[in-house]
Image: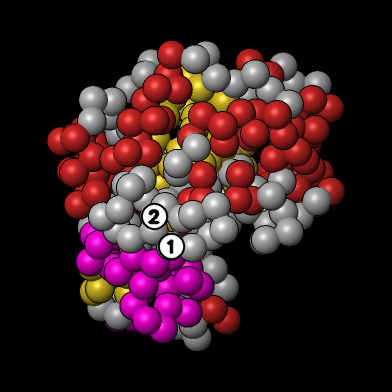
Amino acid sequence: MAADIPSFTLNTGYKMPSVGIGVWLGPDGGGEVAEQMCKTALQLGYRHIDTAYGYANEEQVGKAIRESGVPREEIFLTTKLPNHHHHRVAESLQESLDKLGVDYVDLYLIHWPQAYTEDNKTISYDESPTYIDTWRDMERLLGTGKVRSIGVSNFSVKLLEVLLKETTVVPATNQVECHPCLPSFELKKYCDEKGIVLTAYSPLGRPKEYDGKPVFLEDPDIVRIAQAHNSTPGQVALSWGVQRGTVVIPKSENPGRIKQNISLIKLADEDMLAIDAIHKKAGMHRSLLKYHKNSSDGRIFGWTYEQLGWNMKQGGIVLE
C-alpha cells in the first residue's frame, strides 16, 4: 500500500509524490544493494524512485520495479541525462529506458547544465551544446510518449532566467541540494513564481566528519522539535522540506530508516520558523557536498561558480 504522504502537481498536470528514494550509491552504482533498497522502499509504501544514467544502477532499479509487485503506473520514476550526452538527448533517453526496462519515465532531468564530450572532456560554457541547446532537445521528447515531464537539476536562478527567455517549455522541476543548512529561499521563491517544483537532494545532509562543523541533525532546535513530536531529527528535517513545498529524496539502505523517512509529522508554525532560521547560526550556512570542498580551482565540472550562478556566502555555497 502506498504511504499516506502529500503529492505535488507539476506544471504538466502529473502528480509527484513528495517523498522519494534516492539511489545514488557511489560510482559503481551499488549493484544488488541498489536493487534491494528500491524493493524495500516500494514494500514500505514509496511510489517515487530517483535515479540517473550516471548513477550506474538503472538496470537494478528496473529489476526492483518489475519484481516488486507494484504496478508500473503507480510508480513515479525519475532518471537524468548525463553530462557527456548533451549532444544526443533522445539516444541517451532510450539507453536509460532500455536499462530500466520501461516504456517511459515520469520525469527526465538535465542532470547538470555543463556539457562534456563523449570522452568526458569539458565543453566551454558558451560552446555548443549549451544548456539551451540541450533543453530544446529535451522539449522534443514531450511528444514521443517516452517522458511525461522534463526538468533540470543543479540550476540557479541565473541559469533558469536565461533558459526561460530562450525556450518555450518551463521545467517541471529543479532538483538541487537543499536542507536546513542550505534552504535556498531565493531559488525556491523564483521556482514557485514560475511554477517549477523544487526537489531537494541530500535533504538529510552529511555526517559532521565531512567538514568538522556541526550538522543540522544535531542542532538543538531540530533535536528539541524531534523530542516534542516523539520522532527523529531526520523526520523533522524531511517534514520541514515537504511542508515548505519541496519534494525530498532521502537515501538509506537501512529498512528502519527507509520507513522513518516516509513517516512525516505535522510541524507547528513556530517549528517551521525555527528550522528556517538554522542557516543563520554561525557556521551553518553552507553546502554539504564533497565536490565543493574538493574544488581547488574554484570550478565545478568545468564551470566557475559565477557561470553556474552560485554565490559564496558565509563560507558556503548558496544556490541563489
Question: From the viewer's perspective, is residue 301 above or below residue 166?
Answer: below
User: Along the horizontal axis of the image, is 191 left or right of 10?
Assistant: left
Question: From the viewer's perspective, is residue 186 above or below residue 66?
Answer: below
**Highlighted range, magenta:** 282-310
Gap in Å between the C-alphas at discs 1 and 2? 8 Å
Say which element carries label 1. Answer: loop
Is residue 223 at all visible to an observer of this figure? no
Q: How crowded is mark 1: few (under 14 residues within 10 Å), some or many (20 or more)?
A: some
Task: Please report the residue visible at 64 percent of the width from the left and 51 percent of the height from the top.
Answer: 55
> Which residue is labeled 1 in the image?
122
Q: Report if the CB atoms under discs 1 and 2 are less than 8 Å apart.
A: yes
Is residue 166 at all visible to an observer of this figure? yes
Say which element carries label 2. Answer: loop
- Specify whether residue 285 is painted magenta: yes
Quadrant in which the C terminus is drawn = bottom left
Task: Please report the residue visible at 75 percent of the width from the left and 48 percent of the height from the top.
Answer: 34
Labels 1, 2: front one: 1
Q: Residue furthest left?
A: 165
User: Which of the two labelled residues, at mark 1 and mark 2, occupies the earlier sequence position?
Assistant: 2
User: Along the horizontal axis of the image, is 213 left or right of 104?
Assistant: left
Q: Position of residue 210 (x, y in %)?
A: 54, 79
> Which residue is labeled 2 in the image?
114
Q: Where is residue 42 in the image (x, y as percent from the top left)?
A: 72, 32
Q: How crowded is mark 2: few (under 14 residues within 10 Å), some or many (20 or more)?
A: many
- Specify whether residue 96 is painted magenta: no
For badge 2, the amino acid type reads Gln
User: Along the horizontal axis of the image, is 248 left or right of 317?
Assistant: right
Task: Please report the residue visible at 30 percent of the width from the left and 69 percent of the height from the top.
Answer: 304
Viewer-side residue, 305 vs 221: 305
Question: From the viewer's perspective, is residue 270 above or below residue 287?
Answer: above
User: Along the horizontal axis of the image, is 260 left or right of 164?
Assistant: right
For badge 1, the amino acid type reads Thr
